[in-house]
Amino acid sequence: MSGQEITPQHVQQLESADTRGYWWYVVRQLHVERHLADRLHGRPMEYLDLGCGAGGVLSAVTARFAPKASLGLDGTRQAVEIAKARGLDARFADFRAPLELPFAPNAATCLDVLEHLEDPVLALKHLSAAMQPDARLVVTVPAMPSLFSAWDEHCDHHRRYSRALLREHLRAGGFLLDRCRYVFSYCVPPAFWQRRVVKAVQEMEFPPVSPFVNRAMIVAGRLEAALGCPFPFGTSLLATARPAPRA
């Protein structure tokens, strides 16, 4: 793909999911905000969302932390236009090229983006070069290569990550890993059944669920977070990292 992470059809699905309180977005946002707040210690936030999509995370972080500066970059023009229509500062960017930013971020997110990129290490190198030395990066990626299936191909994923692979890509991209843990552990059994046993391919990445199921999945996610994400498996990996010292 020529610098683009996702298709316009995928953008429409993501916008629908992140604006209706879909459980997966709610739980991921809980983790993201907790880890962003953990590092700033009262400093004004200068925030970048790399791969901002339709702007759901950028909007939520802006509302929660009121950053001194905030910006979303995405490689899909339709996503950028949707984010702009929501009143957000979002811009198109080719992640294969150095980032041109109006400020040096001290906080950044790269959420479910790396798996869409043919060369994620190059994108991480450009990101690390643009950030402040003491900045924090929060990353999420789909986990467990054993779950890779036609569903991932439908979602334009090049890979699912193991801990070792994510650590390797972050290191090669100029970051020092602080922590890396699995999340959405409670999604593994149904994901395994659907993708490896039944081998069904969903037409939507985030299929509609009933209000009861949506609430139940949010409760499960909050419980997992409260327990410190203790299980050695999950459908996603959550990592925090900082730029490596520059020579």
Image (tube, rainbow, N blue to C red):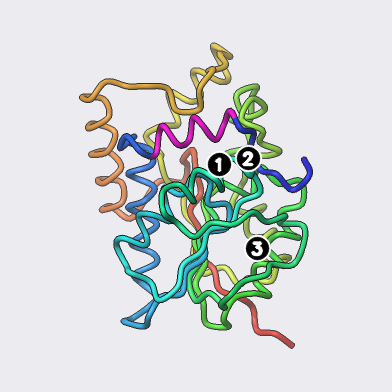
**Identity, as a three-letter code, of the amino acid under mark 3:** Leu
**Which percent across, then down, holds residue 106?**
50, 76
Residues in magenta? 9-18
Q: Position of residue 2 (x, y in %)?
A: 78, 44
Q: Are marks 2 and 1 in contact (CB under 8 Å)?
A: yes
User: Is label 3 in a helix, a strand or a loop?
Assistant: helix
Q: Tell me the residue that label 1 is attached to.
A: 142
Position of residue 135 relative to residue 143, above or below, is below
First of labels 2, 1 by sequence position: 1
Pointer 3 residue = 170
**Residue position marked by numbered label 2 in the rendering:** 160
Q: Label 2: how many residues lie within 10 Å, few (<14), some (14-19) or many (20+)?
A: many
Quadrant of the rendering where the N terminus is positioned: top right
> Where's residue 143, x and y in %?
56, 42
Numbered disc 1: secondary structure:
strand
Asked if 85 appears above or below 68 in the picture, the reply is: above
Residue type indicated by callout 2: Arg
Report x, y in % for residue 63: 31, 60
The amino acid beneath tag 1 is Pro
Q: Give the Cα separation between the discs numbered 2 and 1.
A: 5 Å
Residue at position x 63%, y 44% in the image = 77
Is the C-beta separation of discs 2 and 3 under 8 Å?
no
Residue 122 drawn above or below residue 47: above
